[in-house]
Amino acid sequence: MASYYYLVSSLPSLTAGADMPMRYEEFLLACQGNVDEETYKKLETLTTSSSEGPLLSEWAATYGALMKELNAQRSMALGKTYPAGADRDGMNSQVIAAVLAAKNPLEAEQLLLDYEFTLLDDLVGLHMFDAQVLFGYALKLKLLERRSCFEKEKGKAEFKHLFEQIQQRVYSL
C-alpha cells in the first residue's frame, strides 16, 4: 500500500467537463509495478459494470440503481410499463428527468457524467491513498473514455442522414 502514495499523487486530476488527460492503457502502465497482481488484474478487466473489488460492489449497486431509473423513465416516456422498485432514489429520479429533458444527446451525456462523478466522489469519501481511491479514479477514467467516443460533427452528420431517410420515406407514402 505504501506505493499508492506516489501512484495516486502522480495521476492527473479528472473532471467531468474536461478531456481525458490520459488513456486507460496509460493508467494501467502507471499501475503496473505499483499495485499487487490481483489488483492489477481487476483494473485490467474493469468496466463500469464491474462489481468485484474495492469500491466496486458499492458502485455496482449505485450505478445499477441509476440505470434502472433511466430505464424506468424511458419506458414511461414511451408509454410502456416498467417494474417500479420501492427503493427508488429521489435524487436519481431528478437527475434522470433532467437528462431525458436535455436539448441534445451530448448535453444529456454530460449531465449524466457529472452526476456519476459526484456519486463516485461520495463513494470514495475521505480515502486518499488506497485501493478505494484508485478504483474510483479508474471508473472515472472509464466514464470519460465513453464520453470521448462522442463526436459532435459525426453526430450531426448521422442525425442529418437519418432525418433525410425519414423524410424520403414520408414523401414516398
Image (cartoon, helix red, strand yellow):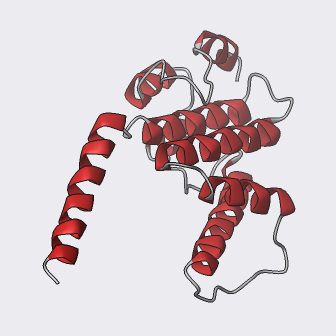
> Looking at the picture, how far across and down is residue 64, in whole percent?
65, 64
Front residue of 162/46: it is: 162
Relative to 136, 25 lies left or right = left
Residue ID at (64%, 16%): 3
Residue ID at (77%, 63%): 93
Residue ID at (63%, 66%): 70
Asked if residue 50 is positioned above or below residue 17 in the image, the reply reads below
Identify the image quadrant of residue 83: bottom right
Asked if residue 31 is positioned above or below residue 51 in the image, the reply reads above
Front residue of 96/43: it is: 96
> Looking at the picture, how far across and down is residue 102, in whole percent?
59, 51
> Looking at the picture, how far across and down is residue 1, in whole percent?
70, 24
Relative to 168, 125 lies left or right = right
Relative to 9, 149 lies left or right = left
Residue ID at (41%, 34%): 148
Asked if residue 134 is positioned above or below residue 5 in the image, the reply reads below
